[in-house]
Image (cartoon, coloured by chain):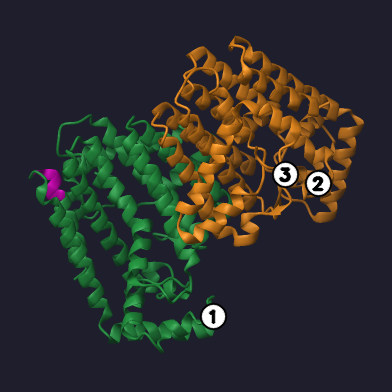
Chain colours: A orange, B green
């Protein structure tokens, strides 16, 4: 089995265990094939951990009907490579030094190499998808990359803008995270020969789980502790990024609240002022019971993901997808 | 006709004049379709000039046999978008403030936006290619993006390394420039229903013209004047990038030459020392007659490009491709 998985995740991945190892094998082959200078970069990035939840979704979504086993494996590799490429560019843009407790590429190799190596991985992921020979899947994949990039751009353009409705936030996190979850499931379903309504159902599943995942991630910034995060609590707010807890705070206290104060100058506030307002905002978020309300939103998305699966035939793959959504649901209690 | 073209280029583009305008129209439509914040970025980049030589090659290479006229137009748009995306990332990595006399995206919008907007353009170019519905063309395009990125990475990895043979330089400039020229011609030929040997011939044409173009560009750094370039003469050497003139200098004076001195520390030298050695290198390059020798190399590649066309049927498209190579050849006298 994949190294570093908790028992629960390993159980969810059981039906696709051997395919997931083949995905890893494919990715490792990439290190040998590439030009020498890229070898160390590739193997560093591939060994940086992560639960491989996106490729697992592709493989599970392909697991309903007889199909060419090779194609979803290549597709799953593409999905993971694309995910890794976006992490590298995001860390570069956000000046992040650490990711999952390890130094980022931009930290170790510098921003220039990080930009170009991210480009290289984007393109390599696209060559993987081409090897499926399925133009629908390739087109969906390319659209996903535009969505991922535009999601990050929207975050930059809207930094320190307090006039962001919840709908704008949901659109942004769809682009940033939901899009690749959708595509991971949809392309698996297409390559797994699922009939069209079931492809749509698996796409919906991916959408809902992706949104749940991103809200969970956003909550970590309010709930987590600085040591685990590798960055200060409240970092999103400090960087001018509005997430669900802060949006709920603005919804409930439209005037005279610390987020308004923090975003007043439409630019990063000075350090002391920033720290004070972030602290106030976090306290208010906790006092108003916003965190449990955010968890309720996550549970709704997980429930919706599970409901999407209803039209699919009962089998190991469906049970695993269901348990995956339950697992996210449970973590949100 | 396209704005800003010299008479000679306009004549070369005559057989594809209306298609080139349709390419521009397609690219302009992109501005309207995109999310509002992206509009100004897109229209800035699309109006930044350039001779559209790559999309012209695609359209000309498609002009030999009856075909669906729409497909090469979309492909030409993709080729130009990819070229623009690479310029944006290259300028970001190179800290360039100016390109064709206009401020770069990273200069005006900052490096973070430049990285993400470049990603957005890469992906948009890929969605264009998908609209051709031709998987061979999509695969070739994706491979080209890996080659472009690895070419830039090789430049970064080999900065201030004096042990670079001419073969390494040729491989690097193939990746950086030749690859997209090849692909522009090859994909046009494929979508234009050319028989396979003629596809290969047009690909060879693209290869040879691309290499000639890049050597010409590298020579500007030795020959040009700082005002026209928007950067100091000898900037490549100062940045640790070996180009053909410097490689010829190293070939002729393997020991005790100013390039060796400049690269001694395997890092950017201090300003005064750098300026002195660059000046010495430029003088030696001129004294040894290396510039005319580089022009001879360019002419060889142009001649090879023209020879590649011999197996193609005689028609307007072939005459234009030939004249394009002649034009590069003449500029190198």
Chain on which label 2 sits: A
> Which quadrant: the N terminus of chain B?
top left
Q: Which residue is mark 1?
A: B265
Q: Which residue is mark 3?
A: A240
Q: How far apart, in angstroms, are the residues tagged by discs 2 and 1? A: 40 Å
Expressed as whole percent of the image width and height from the top left, the position of residue B294 reads 26, 73
Q: Do callouts 3 and 2 mark residues in contact (Cβ within 8 Å)?
A: no
Q: Which residue is mark 2?
A: A228
Q: Nearer the viewer, residue B264 or A133?
A: A133
Q: How far apart, in angstroms, are the residues tagged by discs 3 and 2? A: 21 Å
Chain on which label 1 sits: B
Q: Do callouts 2 and 1 mark residues in contact (Cβ within 8 Å)?
A: no
| Magenta span | B315-320
Residue at the left extreme of this rendering: B314
Q: Nearer the viewer, residue A316 or B195?
A: A316
Above-or-below relation of A115 to A166: below
Above-or-below relation of B150 to A217: below
The secondary structure type at the circle numbered 3 is loop
Above-or-below relation of B16 to B49: above
Residue drawn at x 23%, y 55% is: B6
């Amino acid at each position: 089995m994949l190294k570093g998985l908790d028992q629960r995740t390993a159980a969810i991945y059981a039906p696709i265990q051997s395919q997931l190892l083949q995905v890893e094998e494919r990715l490792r082959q990439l290190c040998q094939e590439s030009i020498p200078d890229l070898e160390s970069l590739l193997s560093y990035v591939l060994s940086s951990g992560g639960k491989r939840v996106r490729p697992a979704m592709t493989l599970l979504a392909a697991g309903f009907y007889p199909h060419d086993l090779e194609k979803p494996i290549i597709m799953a590799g593409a999905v993971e490579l694309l995910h890794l490429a976006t992490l590298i560019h995001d860390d570069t843009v956000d000046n992040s030094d650490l990711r999952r407790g390890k130094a980022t590429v931009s930290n170790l190799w510098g921003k220039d190499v990080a930009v170009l190596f991210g480009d290289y991985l984007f393109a390599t992921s696209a060559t993987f998808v081409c090897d499926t020979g399925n133009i629908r899947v390739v087109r969906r994949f390319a659209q996903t990359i535009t969505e991922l990039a535009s999601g990050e751009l929207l975050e930059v353009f809207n930094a320190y803008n307090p006039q962001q409705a919840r709908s704008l936030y949901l659109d942004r996190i769809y682009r940033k995270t939901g899009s690749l979850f959708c595509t991971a499931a949809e392309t698996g379903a297409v390559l797994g020969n699922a009939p069209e309504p079931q492809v749509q159902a698996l796409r919906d599943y991916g959408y809902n789980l992706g949104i749940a995942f991103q809200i969970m991630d956003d909550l970590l910034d309010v709930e987590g502790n600085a040591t685990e995060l590798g960055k200060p609590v409240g970092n999103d707010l400090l960087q001018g990024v509005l997430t669900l807890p802060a949006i709920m705070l603005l919804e409930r206290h439209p005037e005279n609240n610390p987020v308004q104060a923090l975003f007043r100058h439409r630019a990063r506030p000075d350090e002391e002022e920033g720290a004070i307002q972030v602290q106030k905002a976090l306290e208010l978020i906790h006092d108003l019971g916003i965190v449990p309300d955010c968890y309720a939103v996550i549970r709704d998305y997980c429930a919706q993901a599970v409901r999407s699966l209803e039209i699919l035939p009962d089998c190991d793959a469906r049970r695993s997808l269901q348990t995956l959504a339950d697992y996210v649901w449970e973590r949100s209690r």
